[in-house]
Image (cartoon, rainbow, N blue to C red):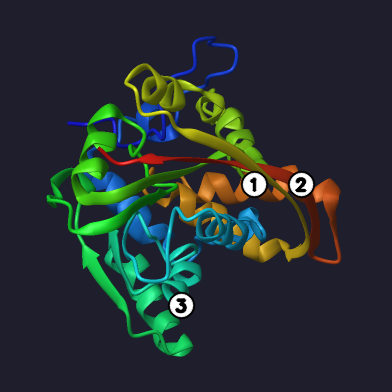
């Protein structure tokens, strides 16, 4: 079974790397699918700010993606990137393992009047394509940075391959703190790994690597935060514990039932010519 729970290989220094909760709790493949389905209504691109729009425009401005292109998006989720890409290309196929995520995407596409989107409930590890698309793009898709996935992307794309991943997402700090309160040292330090671009360079892909930063400021109702963390811990059977810890951790920062949130997050964009 592929290590589908990790965006990239482990970083070399253990001080930077903490085990991903999926890995630490030894979630089965089926449990991982259940996690994303359970989390689908709570999942949001909020922490990315305006980065998705900036990345899509950047790809278009640099000719990596073009208006006449057919695009394959791997791990589309509810459409954080799909809905930015669709109005600017000929057609986009959105792949995800979560039916509920794709149902959210379908509703949004209908509201926006988009009719050039094909939605497929399918595991990327089982997907097969022979150069059917001009561009293959993986946006925050677990496991998409492995050599096997990179080669699969290249088999699907005639022209370009694109990977979008987190570098730093402070939206997960609370989640990591809850795990620590539960006695597990889980975290997301693997995001700072350079293994993907290193492998691409070592294998003569000559990737371009660029970074995007955004500052997110918002007043969030405490109950919305609690609902999000309950959903994130449901698959583990720890939703009640997560709720109690969330309320306790945020109590000093909540005013009139509202949590003032501010953080600077960053993302990594990697693209290269398909072989």
26 w.r.t. 198: above or below: below
Q: Name the residue under label 2.
A: 263
Which quadrant of the rendered structure holds the N terminus?
Answer: top left
Residue annotated with mark 3? 87
How many residues crowd around disc 3 within 10 Å: few (fewer than 14), some, or many (20 or more)?
A: some
CB atoms of marks 2 and 1 within 8 Å: yes
Residue 117 position by quadrant: bottom left
- Contact between labelled residues 3 and 2, with CB atoms less than 8 Å apart: no
- Left or right of residue 175, residue 41 in this image: left
Question: Mark 1 or mark 3: which is in front?
Answer: 3
Residue at 43% over, 90% down: 113
Residue that numbered label 1 is attached to: 171
**Which callout, 2 or 1, points at the residue further toward the start of the chain?**
1
Residue 33, position as x, y percentages in the image: 28, 51
Query: Which image quadrant: the C terminus?
Result: top left
Q: Which of 126 and 26 is in front in this view?
A: 126
| Residue drawn at (38%, 35%) of the image | 22
Quarter of the image for residue 147 reads top left
Disc 1/disc 3 C-alpha distance (Å)? 29 Å
User: x and y percent of residue 149 in the render?
Assistant: 26, 37
Question: Are the residues tagged 1 and 3 within 8 Å (C-beta)?
Answer: no
Q: Is residue 266 visible?
A: yes
């Amino acid at each position: 079974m592929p290590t589908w729970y990790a965006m990239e290989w482990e970083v070399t220094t253990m001080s930077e790397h903490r085990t991903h909760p999926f890995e630490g709790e030894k979630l089965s493949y089926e449990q991982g699918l259940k996690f994303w389905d359970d989390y689908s209504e709570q999942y949001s691109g909020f922490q990315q700010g305006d980065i998705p729009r900036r990345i899509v425009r950047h790809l278009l401005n640099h000719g990596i993606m073009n208006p006449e292109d057919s695009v394959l998006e791997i791990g589309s989720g509810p459409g954080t990137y799909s809905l930015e890409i669709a109005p600017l290309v000929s057609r986009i196929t959105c792949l995800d393992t979560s039916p509920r995520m794709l149902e959210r995407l379908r509703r949004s596409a209908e509201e926006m009047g988009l009719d050039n989107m094909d939605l497929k409930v399918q595991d990327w590890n089982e997907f097969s394509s022979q150069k059917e698309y001009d561009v293959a793009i993986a946006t925050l898709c677990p496991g998409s940075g492995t050599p096997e996935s990179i080669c699969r992307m290249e088999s699907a794309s005639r022209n370009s391959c694109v990977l979008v991943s987190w570098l730093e997402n402070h939206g997960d700090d609370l989640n990591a703190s809850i795990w620590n309160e539960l006695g597990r040292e889980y975290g997301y330090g693997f995001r700072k790994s350079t293994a993907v671009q290193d492998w691409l360079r070592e294998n003569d892909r000559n990737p371009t690597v660029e970074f995007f930063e955004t500052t997110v400021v918002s007043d969030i109702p405490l109950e919305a935060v609690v609902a999000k963390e309950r959903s994130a811990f449901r698959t583990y059977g720890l939703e009640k514990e997560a709720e109690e810890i969330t309320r306790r951790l945020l109590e000093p920062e909540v005013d009139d039932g509202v949590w003032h949130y501010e953080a600077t997050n960053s993302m990594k964009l990697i693209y290269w010519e398909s072989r």
